[in-house]
Amino acid sequence: MKLYNTLSRQVEEFAPIKPPRVGIYICGPTVYDFAHLGHSRTYINSDVLVRALKWLDWEPYVVMNITDVGHLTSQADTGEDKLEKQAKKEAKPILEIAKFYTEDFFKMREQLNILMPDKITPATQYIPEMIELVKILEQKGLTYKTSDGVYFNTSKFKDYGQLARLDLAGMKEGWRVDKNPEKKHPADFALWKFADPEEHRQLEWDSPWGKHSFPGWHIECSAMSLKYLGPTLDIHTGGVDHIAIHHTNEIAQSEAATGKPFVKYWFHSNFLDVSGEKMSKSLGNYIRTDDLIKKGYDPLALRYLFLTGHYRTKMNFTYAALDAAVEAYTKLKSMVADWQGKRQRTQLSPEKLDKLQGLSLQFKTAVEADLNLPQALAAVWQMAKSNIPEQDKWELINDWDLVLGLGLGQISSPKSQIPNNIKILINQRENLRKNKQWAEADKLRRQIVDKGYKIEDKHA
């Protein structure tokens, strides 16, 4: 298997440190608000990676954090803690806020058929590990103290910025948005923060550096990943927006503490745009999986849509694209249900056997080529339209769906193949017919037919 490594900017042959085990750390959410489709795409991409490794007989062990403290509103280690800010807004305890949005996040993952991690690490449960890691860095002379926190001195770490190809010497003050006159270099980042007494924070801890204090965002991921995956991780996943700061800082503090390479392969997913802009909470243009479900969409059709684009390529979400994915996914489910209903073994001719083996190789080659899922889906459709027996098609799709995660192996009969959005159109049309709004009802009938469904009206 070959994977693109952000660190080297090359597609590399995948070789874990202690095969067949693969230690994977997935950057989890900051649980102060709902997850949106941009997050969904990132976690689906990581899920496909884990599924593919399992399918190829590796043994991934997956750790994912939940950030419930320390993520500030500014990249410059200033501003409010996002959880504290949301708690004030909703007038609720922080841990209640974190619990609500964590549960919503995992509901979204379940809707999209994303596998559960082996270990989930909420940051607030690992404060001692974070303190110990900061102490190690302090003992090595890599930190300094300011009025608002303990900072990592990036000038003392030789390869700082290698992941993002940063020019440390050329950085100007204000690079991280806000200026801090006490920082020795604009790239220096907070390992541990001191609470402002006027903030009245809900979450703060006693530490060697003060009674009212809390961890920096970056130190959390290092402390938790090192605890469960050791000094060097096989794979670290996340979004491309974390490359320049969060993941760069994780590398610096982890490698400075252990003296060993932090991550062997960096796996980053590209942005999801909506109407040409990055989908984000800050822009207020985000859409949730629940929003789509309320509109009648099957969330696995969204998963299908995301599989049509390579994880390293930016995607632009539109409802037209989602509708096309619904149509393709619905057609594929209908074909799979038909194959299951005709599961009778027939002897393969040499020609069909060659075709079967060729299709299997085509799918495997696509998966192993840096998770080229668009090519893998092309193999699925080529197989679906081929003349090999339905029994073999059924067995292939069951096997391939271990990677795709589209729920195709769970299909039992064609009766379950009508998606919610079609059912909604049918119900809307029926109500129009009851009210004798024949022209409007006929428009909806044409929409239903255009999506590949036949509708017949029974008269008494």
Image: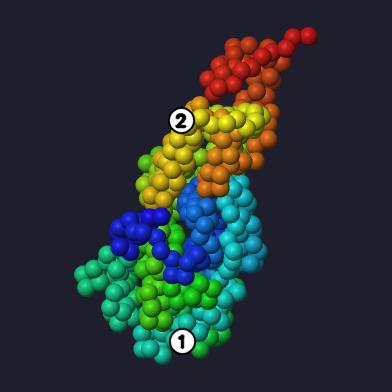
Q: Residue furthest left?
A: 170
User: In the picture shown, does residue 277 fall above or below 3?
Assistant: above
User: Which numbered marker is on residue 351?
Assistant: 2
Q: Residue 256, image x and y in percent?
A: 37, 80
Q: Residue at x 30, y 59 (%)?
A: 9
Q: Residue 209, image x and y in percent?
A: 48, 87
Q: Residue at x 57, y 31 (%)?
A: 347
Q: Give the spatial CA distance, label 2 vs label 1.
A: 67 Å
Q: Which residue position is annotated with label 1?
A: 135
Q: Which secondary structure, mark 2?
A: helix
Residue type at mark 2 is Glu
Closer to the camera in the image, 138 or 52: 52
Residue type at mark 1 is Lys
Closer to the camera in the image, 40 or 384: 384
Q: Residue 86, image x and y in percent?
A: 56, 61
Left or right for 8, reference 128: left
